[in-house]
Image (cartoon, helix red, strand yellow):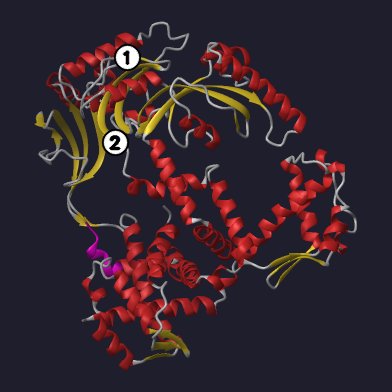
Amino acid sequence: MNIKQFFLGLFFLLSLAANAQNNTKEVLFTIDDKPYYTDEFSRIYKKNLDLVKDDSQKDLNQYLELFIGYKLKVNKAYKLGLENGAQYKNELKSYRAQLAKNYFNDTKITQELVEEAYNRIQKEIRASHILILVDENASPEDTLKAYKKIEDISKKAIAGEDFGDLAVQYSEDPSAKENKGDLGYFSAFRMVYPFESAAYKTQKGKVSKIIRTRFGYHILKINDIRANRGEITVAHIMILKPKPEETEKNPEKTINEIYQKIQQGEKFEDLAKQFSEDKSSASKGGVLNKFASGQLSSEEFENTAFSLANPNDISKPFSTDFGWHIVKLIEKHPVKSMDEMKNELENKIGKDDRSKKITASLNEKLRKKYTYKKDAKQYTLISKLVTNDFYESKWALPENANTYTATLLTINDKKIDGKAFLDFIDRQQKAGFKIKPLSKLVDTLYDKFLDEQLTAYYDDNLETEFPDFANVMEEYRDGLLLFDLMEKEIWDRAKTDTIGLQKFYDEHKMEHMWKKRVEVAIASSTKQDMIKKAQASLKKNEKPQDIKDKLNVNNVINVMINSGTFEEGGDGLPKTMKYNIGVSDVFKEGEYYFVTKVDKVIPAGVKTLEECKGKLINEYQQYLEQSWVSDLKKEFTINVNQAAFDNVKKQLNQ
């Protein structure tokens, strides 16, 4: 998350508080005669009361100062014309589009789809399929040809012929030659929606009805239905299958040796860090992201993982197409409740073919909501301009297209000319429509055009129709401006004002102190004999890397050495080490033996500017902001309505 997202996230909490309008409001203060009201102040204070940790910010007098300071900054942003910036406009447009999505939803249909998806998620289906390819915009002739082909195959399958053999012989899914059409287990959202629906509506052991997706025609056979196993978090140690040139590598032997170490009591996590060849997980002790059935490329791995019963259970070594593994169960995650999954399911529905149901519902609602009228004469003129070249994506706008400025469509008080429809027709050539005759094609395109224009009209008028939407947009607009202003006036200045920063450091350097530090090499091992060998090498002033090369042999990491400058009490230092120059005695903490070689002990002292620069810049920014707000109070005229503020305090303190 970058600083802008963080800043606007915090600001959005304030903006949400300002959504609802109160019928009674009183001017709390003015800035250059622009009024700000008591209801906004009260709502924001109540919203943020539990969020602030500094008790001074809960004090109403202090909070009023903060609120006025915020409004002063927004006024300054407008005074500087920051609202005219291209980046600002683009970000505001992007946010509006995101916020508007909530207003394009059909709550009833969405809830039905959420419930359907959640019910389906309770089960995992194993199915095989046969596919006959046909484009969704194919001609009627090609569509019929594909349908007859799948119909003949369906009859064979229903008659009892082996489904897998039919898939190998007829399916146009390339993978069918190897897997006989078997797709493994899947649940909701793993397949395109019509395919998923057919799978969940077909009984175990039965062949489905013929279904059409954007890929073509399918039939399915349901091989098994089981309860959803949920998700699982595991750690694993993996030894990859050797490459052809790695003739001496024996992954099975290696994985068995690691398994023996686990049986002897060594920690799984430590062994994963040392030996696992899955580099993406080794550094995390082998822990993988949680997964569900069908999400990995290995059914063997999934089944072994899910077969483990209790946390910390460890599997025996097993092989997959990728190599050899040992798996440790961290946690099983049962299917969540519908309330817990609601937001997740809604997000998935919005990205899925299911969303077409919501779009269709919106189109129907808008056709009832608004008054619209088509000009029959204009429509007839434009219809005659579309030729058969459209079917081959060769149709071109007429040279006089710009002259079609007469109104074709009226939505309430908005008039849309014929040129807009011509442009729409031109864009639709890429969709591959094959509808014939041309008159029917143009009618279909007009219906799509009408729905697009109704949606655009609805979108354009969200602020007018929904006060809550208008309020959030207004607050977010100010938040974006405030960020740009702070970046310009405070943050960038704090980074580049070297003279001011140096002066601030000189005045506050005693607040930035080092504890005692030590330049040290720290050797660690779980084996006492190995740490003693490391100790002897350190006494001979051997280099850490040479020591590791000497002691870490036969693909076994016996010793780790960490060198650097560490501050007293830091995480990198053993808690019981002594700060004496030279090589220490061997000492033990937990399961590890340590020996240290201290080269230098640096006493506590003041940090240089460079050493505390990051923290110092942050403090300098706060200092500049406080000074800047004081200047803004002189630049603008502020008048506080004390009587109104007293009333607010009485209400909020009740």
Q: Position of residue 463 (x, y in %)?
A: 54, 71
Q: How many residues crowd around disc 1 within 10 Å: few (fewer than 14), some, or many (20 or more)?
A: some
Of label 2 and label 1, which has the lower sequence position? 1
Q: Relative to 29, is 174 above or below?
A: above
Q: Nearer the viewer, mark 2 or mark 1?
A: 2
Query: Does residue 445 appear left or right of residue 583 in this picture?
Result: right
Which residue position holds label 1?
Answer: 318
Asked which secondary structure carries label 1, the reply is strand
Which residue position holds label 2?
Answer: 333
Q: Residue at x 52, y 57 (%)?
A: 98
Q: Residue at x 23, y 69 (%)?
A: 54
Residue 274 in sight from this viewpoint:
no
Query: Does residue 25 appear left or right of residue 369 in this picture?
Result: left
Pick the quarter of the image with the C terminus. Answer: bottom left
Magenta segment range? Answer: 506-513
Residue 536: quarter of image: top left
Q: Residue at x 34, y 75 (%)?
A: 43
Q: Indicate whether residue 507 is drawn in magenta.
A: yes
